Image: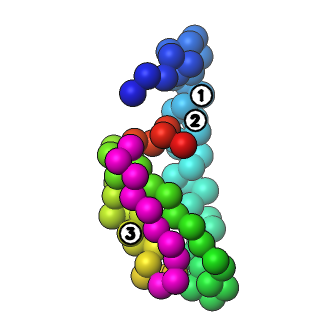
Amino acid sequence: MNTPHLSLPGQHEIQSALLYDYGQTWLRIPVQAWLREHKPPTLVVWGRNDPSFIAPGGDAYKRDLPNAEIHQLDAGHFHL
């Protein structure tokens, strides 16, 4: 993965804060319950080689959104 911007000064701290905040945010938002209730049209595009958001995470949307269109790309996290 070539992400030179992540090597800039201060990026380690910024990315760490974002990662911590991301984890805390999902604890406060009942996303899966909302999806089950509202069943919005959904397109999931996932990088099956992402080490942080692994491939089964993309497929898991089918549990709550059986009509979701899911595409697992041969890519990582920053592909799109």
Mark 3 crowd level (few <14, some 14–19, many ≥20, 10 Å Cα): some
In percent of width and height, residue 32 lies at 54, 76
How crowded pointer 1 is (Cα within 10 Å; few <14, some 14-19, many 20+) is rated as: few
Residue type for callout 1: Ile
- Disc 2 on helix, strand or loop? helix
The residue most toward the bottom is: 37
Say which residue label 3 marks.
59
Residue at position x 56%, y 54% from top? 24
Q: Is residue 72 above or below residue 43?
A: above
Residue under the point 59% across and 46% down:
21
Tell me the number on the disc at residue 5: none
Q: Amino acid at mark 3?
A: Asp
Residue at x 38%, y 43% (from the top left corner): 75
Q: Are marks 1 and 2 in contact (CB under 8 Å)?
A: yes
Q: In this figure, which residue is indicated by the disc labeled 1?
A: 14
Q: Left or right: where does residue 24 sit relative to residue 2?
A: right
The residue type indicated by label 2 comes to: Ala
Marks 3 and 2, how far apart at CA: 27 Å
Image quarter in which the N terminus is found: top left
Q: Which span of residues is magenta-colored?
A: 66-75
Which x, y percent locates residue 12? Answer: 51, 23
Q: How is the image coloured?
A: rainbow
